Structures are given as structure tokens and as C-alpha cells.
Image (spheres, grey):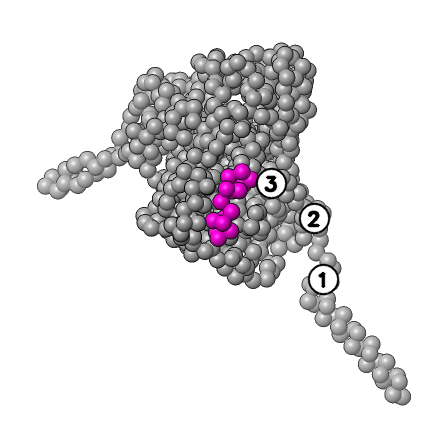
Amino acid sequence: MNLKAVLTLLAVALVTILALVCVLLSGTGKSPESCSSQPKHGNLKSNMAQQSDKGSVFADLTPEEFSATVDYLKKNLDTKLVSAADAKPTENCIYYVDVKYPPKQQVVDYLDRGGEKPKREALAVVFFGDQEEPNITEYVVGPFPNPSYHRDITLEKFNEKLPYHRRPVIGKEYVDAYDLVYQKEFSTAPQFLKALGYDGSNFAALTTVPRGFQSGDRSTWFVLFLKMLESCFAVQPVGLELLLDHKSLDVSKWKVTKVFYNGAYFSNMAELEKQFNAGEVEVIEIQKVTADNDIGSMNPKVTPQPGAPLQFNPGGNRYTVQKNQVTFQSWSFTYGMNANSGLRLFDIRFNNERIAYEISTQEAIALYGSNAPGGMITRYMDGSFGIGRFSFELVMGVDCPYLATYIDASHLLESETPETTKNAICIFEQNLGVPLRRHYSNMHSMYYGGLASTVLIVRTVSTLINYDYVWDFIFYQNGVIEAKIHATGYISSSFYFADGKEYGSRVGEHTLGTLHTHFINYKVDLDVGGIHNSIMTQDMKFDPFNIPWEPEAKIQRPKVVRSVLETENQAAFELHSKVPRYIHFSSNATNKWGHPRSYRVQIVSFAGDYLPEESPVEKAMGWARYKLSVTKRKDEEGESSSIYNQNDPWNPTVTFSDFINNEDIQNQDLVAWITVGFLHIPHSEDLPNTATTGNAVGFFLRPYNYFDIDPSVNSPDGVFFHSKQNYESCESNPIACLPETASCAPKMPPFTYKGFKNLVNL
């Protein structure tokens, strides 16, 4: 055989060996099978809750309905309306439009008894600045799709006219205020600002609330920070703060009435400049922020690498989302998003039996402390800024699992044109990585039974200036509902000087992470076994007991203590008071074993102290005084707070304490108002920003004798096998099927993000 032939054979052999190696390494030599070709959940339909188009009664307004409301009001209010985006304080504008829900009884009659479908209406808030007596007016507009009437409901709803000074600050007012600070006031202190490092564009401001100390005030502190292009300004204070009085409806009369710099107060920037030029003010040089010393940069310090775990279901989604309605196994509910208060759920059912009529966020507040003026007075009521409005687009794979279902949300606020936020809500099923139930037995018999805890999560994330709140509603297979909020984002800060450590922690060269406490309020309208419920409590006590077979011996025997709360006052539990460990919404019906069917409210919270009662603004956030309060449900007591409370907390539009007036709560339609929160004393690990770990609070709604047995026994995910079975086969153990059923690759949609829109000043 010649050399050429030998070389040819060797080459063929080498190619053959390489091909065989590739086959061995890849298993079959084929690309992974697409999950779309895998068998779907054959029993999905039989386990899925029923879905009805009747849930549309709770649907948010569509962009077309928002526009129809604006068009109707502009044609029928007999006054000139300008866009809120351009409105001066002396002009009229539509501030806000949202869906107006019908009374509960009408809705229940429609859903459960075949009653007439309620009319679909809108709630519209109009600022009337161009009137002899400027005011805020609320209208009902309807019916859709073609509005033909409007009705002023202000007096009916609030028992008073709404003073104009209670209006939230709109974008145009912020723009004018910032212009006055940066253009007019800063021009009076050029030498001081140059020494401070101001170059004409490198400062950013954060405003504080409340805006004064008595009803009618409208003075706002502007706290100055270094503006960061790819990092958060809120952790880079420069020590300068200005108080602007913008109470007058004549913008030309606005003025700065106080200036603070590094522990000292001045009447205005001109006085500060004068004292600086006289050598009486020492300027603290702010080090230029670079990539190496930027304490707020979230840019990873290492090169990002792929490889984080990805969760997917080879058989496809086991839940459905149709319009505003969701089903998951035995669960069904409808969802919506309020621009002010955020995520809300309605008509929540298990096995088609209503558990709750409404579960919704109501308000979130943050109370700050500092030795600087802006920080020491701050009492943020986030609803007045817009918890739902500032729920921006979610990032696939970080904010929610990559393969979650993403849903848009629309609102109309400070504009005549509705705005739609892409991917503002996500819905996904998740394996929590822990058994919901399990047991291994090797006593008398050998078997294993277990059920993976897979849940359905509805999520949105709000970014309110520096803080980010992750809002979850979670549905378990055993009939449990969980509401949870994680806090992340950036801490707010003050310039570090003097006794700053008494108000937080030093976390940077000139940065004081300021102490603050968060409170979040939820409305929970439970209908357990029907609309009429009572509140039952259970706890324990030790009872001295003589042993029957040993008369001289005595033990302390634990015993159940039960009671029924009769009035709203009895069911109002203040923040740090002793609360019965078991609190139930109880029905008149009983389960198979003779116990009242009920749902237990279980709260998870580590809130700080609330404001003392002598605080002049305490009543505006009075719900935070109670960790739990149960009241008789009334349509006129639909919300625990108001967007108007922020700018007039001294005379609040909604005073929650008025809801608690000793009414009978036995066998009534009841609402639980649940407050959770956490005290945050910042620390260095809060930089660059706060982690969600350990910063989650919320509550559970748990069935308690509601069922005859844990309903998760009907879950298709259950696993059971005993020692005499071939538990490594699919026939005995569905988990053993995973190598076959999960041997596919999901079809990954391309990453998209359109969340970068307009810059906001607040």
C-alpha cells in the first residue's frame, strides 16, 4: 500500500473517531427537543378554575375609555380646560381619571344572582384654579362606551368641598419651582456655588413633604445632591437645602424663605453668599465622584457571566390570563392597577367559591429622621405621588422570571392622553424549592408522600424616587393567599455633620443614611362562606391540673381560649399591643367536623414606632396606628387614605380613625385593614442599594376549618410511593418521569425593554 493510501485511511479514521466522540458527548447527537413538542398538561382543564367574562366589571379603563372621558368633560363642563402637563396654578385641568367601581351589592347581584350588569363609569378629578374659589372637584362620568352624563360627587364622598391647596403638586408646578431655585435663586450666590463645586448642571434635588406646618401651607425643602449619570444621586448629598414657598397662585410671588448649609441656617442664598464672601462660611469640598469611589454605582464589579438557574415548565403554563382574569388550578381572580394605590385584586375564588371580594394595596408611607431640615420633617405618603403610576416596565429575568407572562397597564394622570406602561405586571408559576407538605415513614410501614410547593405570583414593582417596592400576591395550592412587599432601591440620605449618627449611620464620606420606618396598608374584604362574617379569636393559657392517677402531682396544662369580638373598637389592635395569635373571619356555616368555616389572618411585620398622637400630622396616616383593624364594610369607606392627605395632613380629607366607631361586627360584611412595616436604620451594606433579603413583610390568609381536609390533596403534583413499589418508574412516581418530560429546551423570546421614557422631577 502506498503512502498516499495510508494517509487517506488515517484521515477517514480520524474523522470517524471525532464524529463518534461528538455523538457520545451530546447523548444522541441531536439538538435538544423544543418544549413546544412536549405533551401538554393533560389534566389542566379539569383542575383549572372556571372563568367567566363577568370579571370585566372590575376591569381597568381602556385607553379608549380614558380618552372618551376627557373628550366628554372638555365638551360638557362649560369651562376652559388646559392639559395638566402645561397648567398654571390659575388654570383648570383634568388631573386624574380612573374606573369608578359600582357598589358591592350591585356587583355581587350581577356575579352571583344573575342581576343586571352595573353601568361602567369613570371617576374624574378636576383642578379648578380659574374660579373665584379655586377647588378640587370629583365627577362620575358614564356610561361607557359613550359617556352621556356627569355628576359632581365631591360633597357626597367627602362631606365637604375640597380646598385647592390640598391638590397634589403636578409636573408644571415642579418645573416652575426648579427653575426658580436653579435660575433665580442660585444666581445670587455664584462664588459660594463655585466653591461648592456647582458647574451649572451637576446638582439634582429631592423635595420633601409635608409642605409646611399648618393647613394651607405650601413650602417645600429642596435637598441638593450631586447629579449622577449612571448612579443614584440620593446618596451623594452636598449639604445645601433650600425652602421654597410656592403657596401663591401667582408664580411670580414664589420665593425662597430659608437656606440651610452644613448645620447653619440663612434667610436666602444671597445671605449665604454674603457670609461666604466675608469668610464666615466654610465650604466642605466634595470629592469628585469617579467609578472607583461611587458608593451608589450598581455597575457590576466583575464581568457578568451567564449561568443563573432558569425555571420553566416543559408542558407549558398551568395558568391562564384572559383580559383581566386569571385562573390557576382551583384559583380564579381578576386584577387591576390603580395609578395612586397600585395593584388590586377582586372576586378571588377557590373551587369557584368566593374567598375575598377585594384585596388591594392602599397606601405606603415613610417617616424619616435627620439633623438636617429636609430629612427631619419628611413624611412621604406614596399614594399621592402614584404607587401604580410609577410602576415601570419590568426587566425580564431579574424583576420576574424570564418566561413569565407580562401585562401592560394604562393610566391617565396629569395629562389629557392616557399612558400605557409596557410589561408593568407579571404573572408566573414558581416552584418555591420547599415541600408544601411531606412525610417519610419508617415506623410500622415505609413510604414517602410529598407535594412540591408551587405557587402563582402576581407582581408589580414601584419606583418612588429612590425606593423600589416589589409587590406580590401569592396563591398556594392549599387555599392560602399571601401578600408580600419587598423593599429595595436606594436609601435617602442627609449630609453628614455634627451629631448625625444619632439619626442613622455614616455610609460615605459626607453621607448619612437616615433612619426611617416604612408602613404599608392593605384592604382585605373577605367573604368567607358568604358576605356575612364574624371575628373569632383563639389563643392559649396554662391551666393548673391535678393528675387523675397521681393526685399529689400537678401540671400546667395548655388550654384553648376562644372569643368572638363584638364591636369595631374591640377589633382595632394598635401597633405594638398584644394581639390574639389566631384571628379568624368566621362564617355561620360549619365544616364536616362542626367548626365554623373561617380564614385566619396572620401578619408578618417588624414595624418601628408610629407617630405619637400629639403629632399634628398623625391623623392623616392614622391607619398606621393599627396593625389590624376590622370594620363594618361601607361603600363610603372604600379607601384608608387619600391623595389629598399629603398636602394637608393637618386637616386630612380621609381620617381613618373615623372608620372605627364601635359599630357591631357580628354577622356583618367586614373589612380587615392590615398594616405591615419595618424599621430601617441604614448600614454600609445598604450601598450601593438596599437588598430585598430580610426586607420583606406582609400577611397570610389561611383557611382554618374552611375545608374538611387540606384541598391540596387534589393537586396533580402530589407524590406518593412505598417501599414495595418500583418507585424509580414513571408508573409509581411522576418525579421519575422528569428525565423524559423535561429533556427539552424552552423557546426563549428575545429580550426587550422599552422602559426608558421621560425623566421625572419630584
Which residue sits at x=56%, y=33%?
Answer: 176
Left or right: 100 as drawn, with respect to 696: right
Give the main secondary structure of the magenta stretch: helix
Give the residue at mark 2: 750
Reading the chain from its start, which is encountered first: label 1 or label 3? Answer: 1
Query: Which of the labelled discs sits on residue 515, or is there none?
Result: none
Disc 2 residue type (three-letter): Pro
* Magenta highlight on residue 194: yes
In whole angstroms, how far apart are the C-alphas of marks 3 and 2?
26 Å
Residues at discs 2 and 1 in contact (Cβ within 8 Å): no
Give the residue at mark 1: 28
Disc 2, SS:
loop
Disc 1 residue type (three-letter): Thr
Over which residues does the magenta segment extend?
Answer: 182-196
Which residue sits at x=33%, y=26%?
Answer: 572
Which residue sits at x=37%, y=31%?
Answer: 624
In whole angstroms, how far apart are the C-alphas of marks 2 and 1?
28 Å
Q: Indicate the position of residue 366 as horizontal and vertical percent values.
A: 42, 37
* Magenta highlight on residue 560: no
**Label 2 crowd (10 A; few <14 / some 14-19 / many >=20):** few
Q: From the viewer's perspective, is the residue at label 2 or at label 1 nearer? A: 2
Left or right: 280 as drawn, with respect to 321: left
Q: Is residue 314 visible?
A: yes
Q: From the viewer's perspective, is the residue at label 1 or at label 3 nearer? A: 3
Residues at discs 1 and 3 in contact (Cβ within 8 Å): no
Give the residue at mark 3: 759
